[in-house]
Amino acid sequence: MLPKQLAPTALQLDTIRDEDEFSAFLSSGAELAGLAVEHLRLTQGHLQNANLSSAHLLSPRLTDIKLSSCDLANADWFQTAGRCVQMDDCRLVGFAANESHWQDFCIEHSLCTAVQFRFATLKRTIFVDCDLRGANFQGSDLAGVRFRKCNLEGAQFSGAKLQGADLRGCSLIDIKIGVNELAGAIVEHFQAAYLASLMGVVIKDEHEP
């Protein structure tokens, strides 16, 4: 929910401090690579083409935030609290948001290889057309999360909760997952057969030797 009018705001690396708060803002082309702050608060804002690569944010708070075509490669947003956040056409290679809590979260059309959401909680979350190869969701609560047309090859789900999570339409090659994690997850028939084979189940028709 963004206001109809957002104030153009120049976010600059050398002026952002711990516990700063920005609200009702529109920022385009901000160069914030390597930013390191604690308890940054962003409310009702739109970041466009921002460079946040290798930014280290401790306990940031994001509410009603949209990020479009932003670079978050190798950024570390530890213990983020995000509500109503959308990321579209972003570069999230190696992005880490461990021990974070996200609600009403959407990532679309983004490069997310090797992202980390370890021990995170993702409520009412959807990933759409994202490359999530090698993603790490270890120990996370992914109940009800929807993955749409995503590449999850080699993704790590050990210890994750996937009750009601929808994996249909995704590539699951070499996914790291067990029976306990799969309980309640939604998959297609051919995906179920592949996952069973990963766990050592031998699938044969009755007439086969």
Image: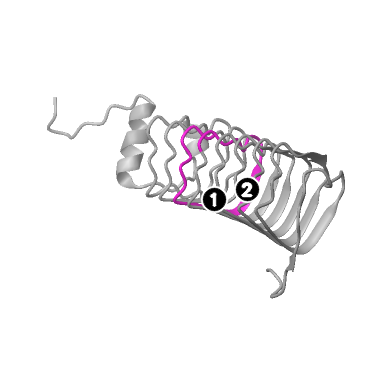
Q: Is 132 above or below relative to 164?
A: above
- Quarter location, residue 46: bottom right
Is there CB contact under 8 Å for labels 1 and 2? yes
- Of callouts 1 and 2, which one flags the residue occurring earlier in the amino acid sequence? 2
| Kind of residue sitting beneath label 1 | Val
Is 191 situated left or right of 119 in this image?
left
Badge 1: few (under 14), some or many (20 or more) residues near its Cα, within 10 Å?
many
Task: Judge whether residue 97 is colored magenta.
Answer: no
Residue 118 x/y as whole percent: 63, 34
- For the residues labelled 1 and 2, the Cα–Cα distance comes to 7 Å
Q: Quadrant of the N terminus?
A: bottom right
Label 2: element kind: strand
Q: Vertically, is 10 above or below 40?
A: below
State the colouring used for the structure image.
Answer: one colour
Q: Determine whether, in the image, residue 75 is placed left or right of residue 156.
A: right
Helix, strand or loop at mark 1: loop
Please name the residue that numbered disc 2 is placed on: 122
Question: Residue 118 magenta-drawn?
Answer: yes
Tag 1 residue: 145
Q: Which residues are magenta?
A: 113-135
Q: Is 24 drawn above or below residue 37 in the view shown?
A: below
User: Which residue is drawn at the image coordinates 67% and 43% (left, top)?
Assistant: 52
Residue drawn at the location 47% of the way across and 29% of the way down: 176
- Compared across the picture, whether 27 is left or right of 154 comes to right
Q: Write down the quadrant of residue 190 in the picture.
A: top left
Q: Residue 209, how many percent across, how many down?
A: 14, 24
Q: Amino acid at mark 2?
A: Leu
Q: Which of these two is toward me, 171 or 7?
A: 7
